[in-house]
Image (cartoon, helix red, strand yellow):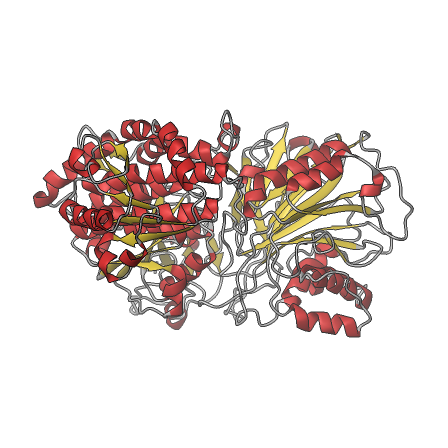
Amino acid sequence: MSLRHCVQTRVGRGRKKVDESVPATSVAVEHEVPRWGVRMLAPATEWSFPLARENVRQWPSSAPIGRRAEYRVVLVTDGLENMKCGAVQAAERVVGAACASAEERYKGRPNNSIFAYLNYLTPKSRREILELLVNGLKRLEYRGYDSAGVALDTPDGKSIAIVRKSGKVKALEDEILSMSNTDFFFPSTSEEEDLQFDQSTDCHVGIAHTRWATHGVPSEINSHPQRSDVDHSFVVVHNGIVTNYKDVKVFLQKKGYSFESDTDTEIIAKLIHHLYNKHPTYSFRELVEQVIQQLSKHFPGECVTTRRGSPLLVGIKAKTRLATDHVPILYSKDHRPHGRGEIPILARSDSTAEFQPLENAEVEYFFASDASAVIEHTNRVIFLEDDDVAAVKDGMLSIHRLRRSLDDSHSREIITLKMEIQQIMKGNYSSFMQKEIFEQPESVINTMRGRVNFDNKAVILGGIKLANALVVLSSTAEDGEIEVRISDYIPEIRRCRRLMLIGCGTSYHSALATRQLLEELTELPVMVELASDFLDRYTPVFRDDVCFFISQSGETADTLMALRYCKNRGALIVGITNTVGSSICRESHCGVHINAGPEIGVASTKAYTSQFISMVMFALVMSEDRISLQTRRNEILDGLHHLDEQIREVLKLDDEVSKLAKDLYQHKSLLIMGRGYNFATCMEGALKVKELTYMHSEGLMSGELKHGPLALVDKAMPVIMIVTRDPVYVKCMNALQQVTAREGRPIVICEKGDTETQSFASKTLEVPHTVDCLQGILTVIPMQLLSYHIAVLKGCNVDCPRNLAKSVTVE
């Protein structure tokens, strides 16, 4: 008798219902890859084992929240004839050994960046390779920039030449431009040879790294690539922290190894070398946890990269069309799902496990931490998942997994980026930040495009609708089927206990800016939390909570850890990010891409306003069935409709703000005060001033003026106050009058034509009037411009402020 039973589950949330009256037979699972509104179903997998009901109850959900070592490695071997186990095979085993017990010792991820290039049957000179590597690092420099280095193969294919420089990528570029062999670091066993920069070769491999110091001061010797020995047998670039590197270093020192740097990365290269010397006959399965067993013998012209935690992608460029849009995942033939050792798994054939262009044509591969580094070369990329290992050999790409879980996808899709090269160029602007400030009229439109219909007053957020995965039980393969239903998360959110908005820095401020509107339109309690503090307090989280995680990069370490903390406790996870394929994007149940476009400047500008609008749109969706709120909704929609024009009007204040900056840039401190919807503007404005100008600034709630801050006010203290015609206008005017009564000379950001407010100000910046909940978008732009102009006057690097990086992947 054929029996079928549908078991509904939401991917990643672990909510399962089992009808115990149904006999146990076999199970076929089809999981949806969460891509926020895009239905992308991975091929169904047959797990051939008796389905006991206790197995269904214990079906693996999201992994327990632990502290895990984060790493990324790209390695190249020198191709010596006696190499039988190279860096390619040893990489995963080495990092696994070096990160022992890391589940309890994870300390975060540094903002390093990796770029690697491998060409196959594509003639390139070493000069071109070096230019590719350096330009790739330039695109990634915002992630960290205190030192940089590159390594590339020598003409005989038997050595690896290295050049490293402390400072920014420009210092490395200047060193390379001299094109002198003496600038390169050669193995001690080889004579300095002519690198033949202009000679074309069909196959090259080069790796590059920009460093943000975590272990060891910024210096050439601490820069990457790091070498295993004086012969450059193994060369490593690494993004991450090996938390127990001191223990491993002591172990290697006892084995006779000496260290020349203070970095934790050097122990990886030397541990690889030690493993090779000790076990020259190790099989690949023994060396790499039975993952990449098809790689063998020697490894000149080969590159391997692996991801855990930090973002990593592979770009593919070929002159012919690609043979497939999916690259299958390889596992060891006797590999078992994590935590289910008793379950035999069907092996996947290796015959179709490698990607290559049709007809063995020429192909180029790019490995990078961010899409902005590869977009000028190709728009076809694969976003790697945690524990993926991507290897290229003889022009063929294969992807392996360190471990297998029952909800793994069977392949990685080759996707086409919508990013354009013009988006990551400065154009006619002097800096990326200036460009991004002036892009805000377009970025806010892009955030609303396809989502807000101003004619019928409708707002649609496709990212909060996701297809549920269904498990279908059947006694025969013919009876098995997969049913997919679209689930709208809005009803569930409306029934929740509370909304929790969690972020860091600018993302936290965008949550703060929209909290009041969310409370008004959803009629739910709304908590706004700093991710780091949220984790420190072990905040109670319940299954009927809805948690929003806001991050421009989608990789912010504290925010990501908070997400996993909440997800492990059963909360519904909503992600708000600007980066497709980011960790927060993948690990959320649903969410919204803000579509602000690439943001290169470290200080966030257009991402803030797009995050702001995304949260406003969510509030409008939540209130669409509330008759009593329709007048308010229409008022907000009218404000959104004219927002881009009003932003253009505010940007015309640039010259006026520039003159104001000349009066302020020599001061040591700045107070910014506001209330209501404009309090978040004060916090964000103060952050921008601190980030860019290194001037102390403080965002203050005007209502707290008498509780301490008023003591700071005198005629020498610059004060900026934001006073708009909103429900707290009278209270803000009271604070303004208190400041002037203490001989303060406030600079006021107010609405056009507000003569009453202007009469109490020493200087004013006038912005257009809009609905109160959107006023924060218009009032924050003068603060962005002011911080920019003060930074320029002080000679600060606007795009790369000292001690800061764009994607904060360290707790």
Asked where in the image residue 262 lies, by quadrant, the reply is bottom right
Percent position of residue 328, x then y: 57, 47
Q: Residue at x 13, y 44 (%)?
A: 625
Q: Residue at x 71, y 57 (%)?
A: 89
Q: For this rendering, which residue is in front, 239 or 589?
A: 239
On screen, residue 349 above or below 322: below
Q: Can you say which quadrant of the picture contains the N terminus? A: bottom left
Taking the image as shown, residue 393 lies to the left or right of residue 457, namely right
Q: For this rendering, which residue is in front, 212 or 695?
A: 695
Q: Residue at x 23, y 47 (%)?
A: 740
Taking the image as shown, residue 168 lies to the left or right of residue 198, namely left
Q: Residue furthest top?
A: 428
Percent position of residue 330, x then y: 60, 53
On screen, residue 208 above or below 229: above
Percent position of residue 630, x then y: 11, 40
State the count of labels: 0
Q: For this rendering, which residue is in front, 352 or 769?
A: 769
On screen, residue 786 above or below 575: above
Q: For this rendering, which residue is in front, 685 or 199?
A: 685
Percent position of residue 460, x then y: 26, 39
Asked where in the image residue 530 lies, by quadrant, the reply is bottom left
Q: Residue at x 53, y 41 (%)?
A: 796
Answer yes or no: is residue 439 visible.
no
Taking the image as shown, residue 6 lies to the left or right of residue 384, namely left
